Image (tube, rainbow, N blue to C red):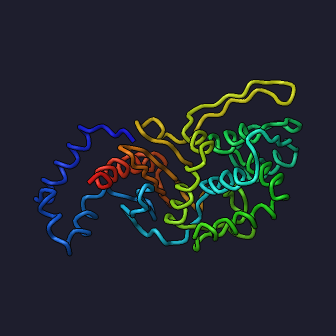
Amino acid sequence: MRIRKARLAAVGGALALATGLAAPAYAQVSAPAVATVRQQAPAVYANAAYLMDASSGKELFGKNAGERLPIASVTKTMTAYLVMKTAKPTDVVQIKREDVQYAEDGGGTTADLQPGDRIPVGELLYGLMLPSGADAAHALARTYGPGVKGFVAKMNATARELGMKETEYVNADGLPTPDGDGYSTAHDQTVLAAKALQVPLIKQVVGTRYHSLDANGEHGTYGWRNTNRLLGTPGAIGVKTGFTRAAGYTLAFAGEQDGHTLVGVLLGESDSSRRFDTAEALLSWGAARAAA
């Protein structure tokens, strides 16, 4: 993530003034070091947060990172990851009326898919991740479960394989259900986001601000805009937004700088815009710590 050097220097200088310590001074004191770093970290108003250097696996920041919370459409990160473990980008998914109806009945955001269209998996991932299409999630889950229930079972099995012990999925999209919501933690979702970003196509998709698909004999014209406003920040590479009343505003985010990939998650934020500001601040702050 090419965070502006001047900005990092200014932030570092301001933090040193605020604490009255230069970097070498607190580095020499082992016991208070963690507390000092916590004081210097950006304010995080979300209920839970986690930030790690995915290049090394080092934790950079944590706040209630192990608390089970609903995650809303951040769920779709697992959907994309699992689909890419199963399917080829050139495989074709036929959209059915039930996919569209599911999203409409659930009040979810959609990719405006049209029944009868046949869309390659590689293209449908954009409809899943950019506008956060619940119709796309349903179509993919239905196809690669096979059946939605079978797909959800695979999601939970994959979570266990990745060591996500505090995660339980109930659908492929994160919408509320009459039987209750799924849950996860900021830590678990950060682990997943880091893993998903290792898949080249997923990394490409979540870092794309707008994607269009021209009509042909198989499908109509589509245009999908990414809901992730963090992508306007230099070096930001994704990952996924979410919102439900129960979950609040959620965000899986990532950025790259100087050979480091920083990945984080915010859960339970009450202000939509603030989650992006917080993520940007954490990435800038974390980049300095990762490079130290």
Is 22 situated above or below 230?
below
Q: Residue at x 53, y 67 (%)?
A: 185
Q: Report which quarter residue 256 is drawn in.
A: top left
Q: Nearer the viewer, residue 61 or 59?
A: 59
The quarter of the image holding the N terminus is top left
Tell me residue 240's x, y (percent). Answer: 56, 48
Tell me residue 117's x, y (percent). Answer: 85, 35
Q: How many badges with numbers are in the image?
A: 0
- Whether residue 105 can be seen here: yes
Q: Nearer the viewer, residue 275 or 161?
A: 161
Q: Residue at x 82, y 24 (%)?
A: 216
Is 210 situated above or below 227?
above
Q: Residue at x 65, y 69 (%)?
A: 168
Is 73 situated above or below 157?
above
Residue 228 falls left or right of residue 128? left
Tell me residue 178's x, y (percent). Answer: 75, 66
The quarter of the image holding the C terminus is bottom left
Q: Residue at x 39, y 51 (%)?
A: 278
